[in-house]
Every structure is written in C-alpha cells, then in structure tokens.
Image (spheres, rainbow, N blue to C red):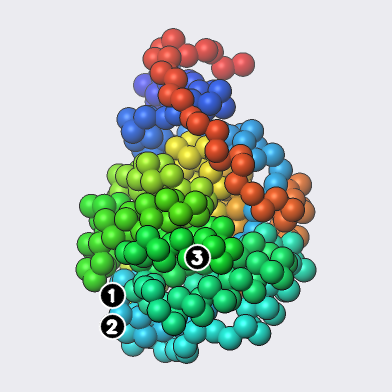
C-alpha cells in the first residue's frame, strides 16, 4: 500500500471516530479540531463535509432556521472595523440615516413572516448602547415587534457596558442578541482598534446574565489563519453562543480590506464543517458574503453542516432573493424552521467523552 493511501485510510478512520463521538454527545478537543482544519485532499474534504452533514441532521433534523435583518441605524459609526462599509473612518458611499421609525420594521417583519423567516434582527451601526432616550426608542421597537408576534425580535446593537441595559432589553421582549466575536483574540486587533475582543466578551456576559440568548460568530477571509478560525470556534463554545453566524468577507471598495483575495469556496465549506464538529448543537448560520464567495456552491453549506441561513439583503450588500433560497431548501429536502422560535435543542449539557485512539477506531463498513 502506498504512503498516500495509508494516510487516507488513517484520516478516514480518525474522522469516523470523531464523527461517531460527536453523534454520541461527546466533544472534539483542540487537537482534534486542528486535524479537521488541516485536512486537504479532495477525498478527506468530501468525508469531512459528509460528517458535517450527518452531525447537522442528527441534531437538527431537516429544519433550517431563517433570519433576516433590518438596518435600524445606518453609517457614520465611530468604530474602525476594517471590513465594514459603515465605519466613519472610510469613504464607501454606503447609506447613512438615524434610528428607524416603526413602519419599516413592521413592513420587514410582515415580509419576513410571509417568507417563513423565524427572526428579524434590528441592527444599528454605532459603538454600543447606554441608558437614555435611544435605549427607550430601541425598547419601543422591540416591544412593537414582540406584540406584533409575526417574528422573533432580535437585535444587534453593539457593546453593552451596563448590565441594566441588557435587563431593559430583556424586559422589552428581546430574546436573542447578535454580537459577533468576529475573529480570534489574537487576530482581533488586525481588524479593529477602537474596541477589543474583551469588550465583546463582556457584552456577551451581561446579555447572558439578563437571560438573553446569544447569536455570535465571526467573519472569515480577512487574512486570518486556520488556527484563528479554530480559536474563534472554541471561544464561541466557551462564551455559550446559541446561534453562530459565519460571514465570509465581501471586500467593500473604500475599506482597508477591499483588496483581500477571496477564500476558496472549499475552504469556506471546510470551515463550516469544522464549526459543526466543535459546535454540534448550535445553529450554524451562513450569513453575509455567501452569494459572492460561494457562487454555485451555496447549497452545499447545508451538506457541510450549516443549519441556518441569513436571508434577504444584508446591511449594505445584496443577497440572492428569498424565493431562490426557499427553492434551494425545497430542492434539498430541507424545511424552514419557522414555527420553532425556541432554543431548547441547545440547552443539553455536553459531556466530554475521550476518543478512542485512531488505530483502535472501528473499521469503516
Ligand atoms: S462592524 Fe459595527 S461597530 Fe464595526 S464599524 Fe461596522 S457598524 Fe461600527
């Protein structure tokens, strides 16, 4: 047997052992995850995606959770995130307006509900939220959405330093807050210096203490290494994220990242599958940048382990139509999870089960 086929067999056995362990309720270690992120042959990547799909199906069935966002306050942001067209540091031509009135939120919620979307997030381009008239207005919008009952009201409103702000949002009816860690702790200063990774973790701690579920993920393709992606996934596991959006950089002209070359589609799919191994029960949501980066491979995100999709247009860029996304799900035999507004399937504790060493792993059928 050649050296290459010995390696292929050993990789296949190790993948099989890790996949079975996750299906049985166990966890992968950092070392195991490093093995997954470093697989590179087409055969191994095919096996990895197949396991990502199997783990998704085991924990999520054929349901796909759909989310939309409404840009509730656009542009002129005080922060310098290098991927973002809404930062006041860069000239990008993206729209600028103040906090949104009730009517556009109502229209978005109605449209989302018609399209079988579970949740709509109010997203604001500013550093964060403090006590004051703006918090009152935000709470009014959330209350209106909750009362309307068409969709789950979510929000992504930046950094929260005051635990009372999180409590007020919860009282208004907020169930889930979007707050990406964006990248690894090591890589974070490469894309933002006006706030820190720790600021983001602190916000998540305040939200969790108030009983709000966490939607937190990151952006891949900013020049980070696979180790940074691995570290991000483990930080999200430790932070207790319920929904994990994976955005893929869509380089915006005028931002410092405008010339970053795109990630190969197979690297994106590999990252999704690795996240599914590390975060088996969480919703893994493919969000911004999927259309431009994955092109014809978009439908493969579910076969790699994604269980949720951001639909409708993104904050400042266009997406494919919701009708096309719904058709894609139907063609794959998947169904939008529009009746399940809860997070029950992520609450079971995960207990670590040590892996059998690769050489003792069961033989493949
Ligand atoms: S990502 Fe958010 S915080 Fe950063 S510049 Fe854009 S709107 Fe501001």
Q: Earlier in the sequence, mark 2 or mark 1?
A: 1
Mark 1, other Cα within 10 Å: few <14 / some 14–19 / many ≥20? many
Do the residues bearing badges 3 and 2 touch, measured as CB atoms within 8 Å? no
Question: Which image quadrant: the C terminus?
Answer: top right
Camera-near label (1 vs 3) is: 3
Do the residues bearing badges 1 and 3 touch, measured as CB atoms within 8 Å? no
Do the residues bearing badges 2 and 1 touch, measured as CB atoms within 8 Å? yes
Q: Residue at x 51, y 80 (%)?
A: 137
- Asked if disc 3 is less than 8 Å from ligand 1, the answer is no
Mark 2, other Cα within 10 Å: few <14 / some 14–19 / many ≥20? some
Give the residue number, with chain letter if any, for mark 2.
89
The image quadrant of residue 161 is bottom left
- Asked if disc 2 is less than 8 Å from ligand 1, the answer is yes
Q: Earlier in the sequence, mark 1 or mark 3?
A: 1
**Does residue 71 appear left or right of residue 104 in this picture?**
left
Circle 3 SS class: helix
The answer to whether residue 305 is above or below residue 96 is above
Q: Do we see residue 353 in this rendering?
A: yes
Q: Residue at x 72, y 74 (%)?
A: 111
Whole-percent x and y of residue 299? 63, 54
Circle 1 SS class: loop
Q: Do we see residue 258 in this rendering?
A: no
Labelled disc at residue 80? 1
Whole-percent x and y of residue 125? 42, 77
The image quadrant of residue 354 is top left
- Asked if disc 1 is less than 8 Å from ligand 1, the answer is yes
Q: Separation of disc 2 and disc 1 at Cα?
A: 6 Å
Give the residue number, with chain letter if any, for mark 3.
169
């Amino acid at each position: 047997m050649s050296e290459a086929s010995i390696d292929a067999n050993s990789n296949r056995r190790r993948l099989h052992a890790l996949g079975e362990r996750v299906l049985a309720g166990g966890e992968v270690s950092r070392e195991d995850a490093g093995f997954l992120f470093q697989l590179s042959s087409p055969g191994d990547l095919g096996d990895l995606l197949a396991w990502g799909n199997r783990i998704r199906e085991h924990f999520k069935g054929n349901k796909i959770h759909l989310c939309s966002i409404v840009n509730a306050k656009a542009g002129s942001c005080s922060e310098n995130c290098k991927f973002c067209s809404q930062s006041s540091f860069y000239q990008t031509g993206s729209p600028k307006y103040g906090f949104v009135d009730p009517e556009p939120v109502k229209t978005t919620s109605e449209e989302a509900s018609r399209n079988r979307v579970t949740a709509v997030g109010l997203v604001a381009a500013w550093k964060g939220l403090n006590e004051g008239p703006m918090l009152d207005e935000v709470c009014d919008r959330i209350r209106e959405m909750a009362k309307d009952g068409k969709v789950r009201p979510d929000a992504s409103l930046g950094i929260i330093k005051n635990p009372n702000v999180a409590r007020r949002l919860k009282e208004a009816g907020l169930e889930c807050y979007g707050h990406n860690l964006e990248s690894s702790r090591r890589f974070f200063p490469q894309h933002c210096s006006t706030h820190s990774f720790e600021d983001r973790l602190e916000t998540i701690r305040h939200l969790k203490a108030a009983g709000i579920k966490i939607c937190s993920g990151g952006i891949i393709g900013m020049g980070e290494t696979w180790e940074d992606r691995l570290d991000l996934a483990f930080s999200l596991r430790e932070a207790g994220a319920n929904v994990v959006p994976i955005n893929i950089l869509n380089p915006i002209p005028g931002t410092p990242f405008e010339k970053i070359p795109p990630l190969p589609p197979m690297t994106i799919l590999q990252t999704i599958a690795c996240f599914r191994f590390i975060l088996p029960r969480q919703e893994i949501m493919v969000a911004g940048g999927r259309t431009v980066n994955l092109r014809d491979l978009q439908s493969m995100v579910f076969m790699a382990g994604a269980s949720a999709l951001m639909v409708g247009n993104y904050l400042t860029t266009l997406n494919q139509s919701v009708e096309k996304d719904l058709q894609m799900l139907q063609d794959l035999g998947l169904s939008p999870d529009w009746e399940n507004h809860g997070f029950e399937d992520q609450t079971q504790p995960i207990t670590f089960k040590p892996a059998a060493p690769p050489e003792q792993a069961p033989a493949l059928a």
